Image (cartoon, helix red, strand yellow):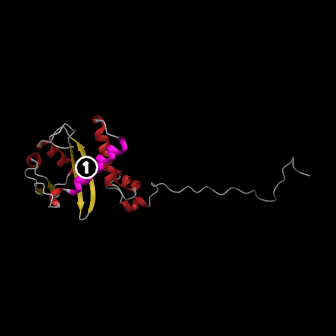
Amino acid sequence: MGRGTDEQPMICAAERRGDERGRCVLRVVPDCSGKTYRMFAEEHVDRSAHVRSDGWGGIRAGLRGWEGLDQRKFDAADEDARLPTARHAVSNFQAWALGTFHGLPRERLQSFADEFSWRYSHRGGDATAELLADCCAGFYTKAELRTSVFLPQPFVPDPPKRPRGRPRKHPILQL
């Protein structure tokens, strides 16, 4: 997860909404080149977004001409230069992978990163409504889905049917 190591390179983009943490996406990548960063940004980042990153040259080369690029050299005293939201997402992913699975195989790392990204991005809400909203994007609002027949409804069994008229005695028990 770091540059200059033999570990699998990954790119993380994490959304920050004021003091809240928003969505995140983690991608396993072949390298940390400018081309890789360009492809990642085109796929996962809105063109109008303000992108804050560290001073890595691959980002500078890949996002050259990106309107909202704000690159800063890491500074522990500067809250924004530390990239706290991205570091939080990456450290949570590492803790989840090591604590839950005791490590992950490289060939399946992206599927675990996708699972983590979805859980991180949909935490704290109604996961079923969020999943349906993702699947039905543009067709229904989340409010419509929360009251929808698509969501699991509590099962209430029908009351037992009672015989009409006088109760009949069991033929063997009649006296």
The foreground one among 104 and 152 is 104
The foreground one among 85 and 38 is 85
Residue visible at 30% across and 45% down in the picture: 114
Q: Does 90 appear in magenta?
A: yes
Residue at the farthest bottom position: 18
Taking the image as shown, residue 1 lies to the left or right of residue 102, namely: left
Q: Quadrant of residue 9?
A: top left
Residue visible at 79% across and 59% down in the picture: 165
Can you give x and y, in whole percent of width and height, for residue 7 in the image?
21, 38
Q: Does 72 appear in magenta?
A: no
Dominant SS in magenta:
helix
The foreground one among 96 and 148 is 96
Can you give x and y, in whole percent of width and height, for residue 28 in the image?
23, 41
- Find numbered disc 1 in the image and state the secondary structure of the residue it sits on: helix
Can you give x and y, in whole percent of width and height, for residue 74 in the image?
13, 54
Residue visible at 66% across and 58% down in the picture: 159
The foreground one among 76 and 45 is 76
Residue at the farthest front position: 77
Q: How many marks?
A: 1
- Residue type marked 1: Val
**Disc 1 packing (10 Å; few <14; some 14–19; many ≥20):** many
The residue labelled by disc 1 is 90
Magenta segment? 84-101
